[in-house]
Amino acid sequence: MNAATAATAAAAAAAMPLIRLRGVTKVYGSGSAAVAALRGIDLDIDEGEFVAIMGPSGSGKSTAMNILGCLDTPSAGAYLFRGVPVQRMDRDQRALLRRRHLGFVFQGFNLLPRTTAQENVELPLLYRGAPRAARHAAAREALAAVGLEGREHHTPAELSGGQQQRVAIARALVTNPTVLLADEPTGNLDTQRGREIMELLAGLNRERGITVLMVTHEPDMAAYARRVVRFRDGRIDSDRTQAPLDTPAAETR
Ligand code: ADP
């Protein structure tokens, strides 16, 4: 690619949303057993957005999240990440996209038991081959960013549910992701702990510009997002922006 085409490609990518889905369908199984989980999704998400994905059980939310997270591929349609068609990437390139740009947070925390918070958070950096000292420093910083300074050497069993989810968020943050994909991150927590996690996610979105995509069933938690996309029967039923719930930090802006 010469300089002029490189500049044109860069300009085109800059004009594109961070994430673009066009006509995305997903069919599981075949023949009479086929289930259409997604029936044609068009969705644009800009860098820095905080989006809540809602909808009844079975409406296609997890399928969409798996596709966005490069854990699954669409049956048809296009997924563009910064203008680059993900479906044209090979397995390794998709894995690279996942490692470089995406962070995951799950309802069940998915921490390694009998492993300290520090070691859990270091894990993604270990896979990257980062040197020990760098891993150590980055994990400490990520744990401090989620309010867990001083808990580095606790194992999950020695932490509350809310604290375990903070460790999981620190593990997602340690690689500096562009996007945080959170699948019902407050689903296993009581309301107060859930709110604290939402304040944390809202703060990361506001202060670090991390794009947050979060599936939730709870309107109280979706209230923290600036945009709510509702799924129904494998389609997008509504897509609305809203004034996010004022968090203490947001009020001082
Ligand atoms: P949600 O996350 O909104 O509950 P899902 O994306 O999990 O919805 O599921 C959408 C539809 O696809 C449902 O009918 C579900 O049963 C079906 N489905 C999801 N995953 C699979 C799979 N691996 N095999 C077959 N059907 C599936």
Image (tube, helix red, strand yellow):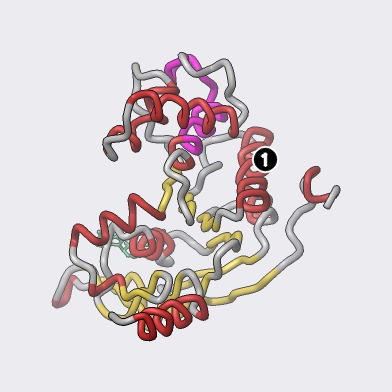
* The furthest residue to the front: 3
Q: Alpha-carbon neighbours of circle 1 within 10 Å: few (<14), some, or many (≥20)?
A: some
* Magenta span: 154-170
| 195 drawn magenta | no
The residue positioned 52% from the left and 58% from the top of the image is: 213
The image shows residue 118 at horizontal and vertical percentages of 43, 23
Q: Tell me which residue sits at (43%, 71%) in the image.
A: 82
Label 1: state its secondary structure: helix
For residue 104, above or below residue 58: above
The structure residue drawn at horizontal position 65% and vertical position 55%, both measured from the top left corner, is: 219
Q: Nearer the viewer, residue 90 or 53?
A: 90
| Along the line of sight, the residue nearer the viewer: 88 or 223 | 88
Rendered-image quadrant of the N terminus: bottom left
Mark 1 lies on residue: 195
Considering the whole magenta stretch, tell me its main secondary structure. Answer: helix
Q: Residue at x 18, y 71 (%)?
A: 33
195 sits to left or right of 127: right
